[in-house]
Image (tube, rainbow, N blue to C red):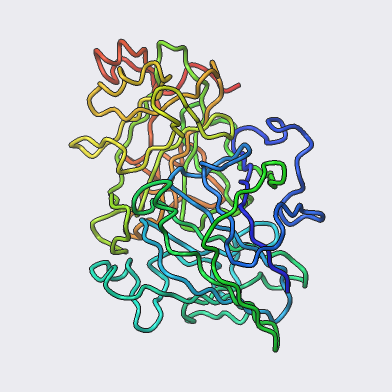
């Protein structure tokens, strides 16, 4: 039995441009490959290293700036059982997920490899705050999750450890996610309960380590970069959102679905506008009752990225990572959102437009390629217009728009002065600037 925990540097998962083109050909080995680097020595506690956008040391595609990811890995041996004991997070969303040696989700013996917050049953005498939010803080909030290849349907809080046929010595990845912590970021993550302890049982041998009270940060030189691709239709034009093929993506969040588009930044006198009907979702940064007929989703956000790097705009307003979550998004009386994307110099003008939510272009990038990711997290089964209703193998813009209906994000390009005067009637649907 071998276990190590480290801060996952981030998966360079590309949908628009290849990581090799951006990072150069000499990247570190892929996840689970022979000779995979060991960025940190084994630790004496579980989930010892945190990964979030404030400490990303390399180009990364996909992290939300309200999310933290705690990563653990073990070397698999047949007959092994892993038990995690912890306290429920005080946040909008939390989950456990297991991945195979190649960073892929899987199902074994009819059991999926993940548990979202509201599905985790509490220990006897405890409560799950997503099931009983009225008792949050008044009762213990402890849980136990078991990873074993004896997992079968109907077993409480039990996930498969590996796919069928996994060989001894393979890497097993475990990710503990927290989104939108109470108190905001980064303080909200620091005040969360200590990550779960971990016990590994192998025959007559049992080893237990506590959850790490402090989280390390490793040098960027030792961070693994993982390459993958996400397919899209070559016919999709700029500012037409499509569903990517997620079957080849690494460490994907099983409770999340999203659509993407890319575009070339317009001239500085123009803006890019994204409109659509907003799903209903909680706005609290604490657990809310789920499922809840009042809400379509637990959380959604729109993030803009420059190539595979989250937009960082350090001028005037501090670092702006280019993400806006549902509670940060203006929604009009008709239930629609309107993101207006432009340079920092136009922020005040854009924010003065009624109903507009500003998203920044990166500083000093000129007419660069950008990607927009519209993330939808934990969708109510009764809501059928989210990206999770699309095939996992992806869908082109036309199919995506047909399924999402009024909730499909529409993209426009507008001269800012004309948009201020006349609204969307002054805009051109799509983008006249092709992807380069």
Above-or-below relation of 308 to 37: above
Q: Is residue 357 left or right of residue 332?
A: right
Q: Quadrant of the N terminus?
A: bottom right
> At x 43% / y 32%, what residue is drawn?
320
Q: Residue furthest right?
A: 35
Residue 130 at what x, y percent from top left?
Answer: 33, 66
Q: Quadrant of residue 350?
A: top left
Judge left or right: residue 420 versus residue 55.
left
Vertical placement of residue 51 versus 293, above or below:
above
The picture quadrant where one finds residue 134 is bottom left
Residue placed at 25% from the left, 21% from the top? 352
Q: Is residue 435 above or below residue 201?
A: above
Q: Is residue 34 left or right of residue 16?
A: right
> 259 or 314, which is in the foreground?
314
Q: Quadrant of the C terminus?
A: top right
Q: Is residue 390 above or below residue 204?
A: above
For image coordinates 54% across by 29% down, the residue present is: 306
Quick one: which residue is furthest to the left in this view?
333
Task: Point out residue 435 in the picture as x, y percentages from the top left corner.
Answer: 57, 23
Q: Residue at x 58, y 73 (%)?
A: 198
Task: Give 313 or 343, whichever is nearer the viewer.
Answer: 313
């Amino acid at each position: 039995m071998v276990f190590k925990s480290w801060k996952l540097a981030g998966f360079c998962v590309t949908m628009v441009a290849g990581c090799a083109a951006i990072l150069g050909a000499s990247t570190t080995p892929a996840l689970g490959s022979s000779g995979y680097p060991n960025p940190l020595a084994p630790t004496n506690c579980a989930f010892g290293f945190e990964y979030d956008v404030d400490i990303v040391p390399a180009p990364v595609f996909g992290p939300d700036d309200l999310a933290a990811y705690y990563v653990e890995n073990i070397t698999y041996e047949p007959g092994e059982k892993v038990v995690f004991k912890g306290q429920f997070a005080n946040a909008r969303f939390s989950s456990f997920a297991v991945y195979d040696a190649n960073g892929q989700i899987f199902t074994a013996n009819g059991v999926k490899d993940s548990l979202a917050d509201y599905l985790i049953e509490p220990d006897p005498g405890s409560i799950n705050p997503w099931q009983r939010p009225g008792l949050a803080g008044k009762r213990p909030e402890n849980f136990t999750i078991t990873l074993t290849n004896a997992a079968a349907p109907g077993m409480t809080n039990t996930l498969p450890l590996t796919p069928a046929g996994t060989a001894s010595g393979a890497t097993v990845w475990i990710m503990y996610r927290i989104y939108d912590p109470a108190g905001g970021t980064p303080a909200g993550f620091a005040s969360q309960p200590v990550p779960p302890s971990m016990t590994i049982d192998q025959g007559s041998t049992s080893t237990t380590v506590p959850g790490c009270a402090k989280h390390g940060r490793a040098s960027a030189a030792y961070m693994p970069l993982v390459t993958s691709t996400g397919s899209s239709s070559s016919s999709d034009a700029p500012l037409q959102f499509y569903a990517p093929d997620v079957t080849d993506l690494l460490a994907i969040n099983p409770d999340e679905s999203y659509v993407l588009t890319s575009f070339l930044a317009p001239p500085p006198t123009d803006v890019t506008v994204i409109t659509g009907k907003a799903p209903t979702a909680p706005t609290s940064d604490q657990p809310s009752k789920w499922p809840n007929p009042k809400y379509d989703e637990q959380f959604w956000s729109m993030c803009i990225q420059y190539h595979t790097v989250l937009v960082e705009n350090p001028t005037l307003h501090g670092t702006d990572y280019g993400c806006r979550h549902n509670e940060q998004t203006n929604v009009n009386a008709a239930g629609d959102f309107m993101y207006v994307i432009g340079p920092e110099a136009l922020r005040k003008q854009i924010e003065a437009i009624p109903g507009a939510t500003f998203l920044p272009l990166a500083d000093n990038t000129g007419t660069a390629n950008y990607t927009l990711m519209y993330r939808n997290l934990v969708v109510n089964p009764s809501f059928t217009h989210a990206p999770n209703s699309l095939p996992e193998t992806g869908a082109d813009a036309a199919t995506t728009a047909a399924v999402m209906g009024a909730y499909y994000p529409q993209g426009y390009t507008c001269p800012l002065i004309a948009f201020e005067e006349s609204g969307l009637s002054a805009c051109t649907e799509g983008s006249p600037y092709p992807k380069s």
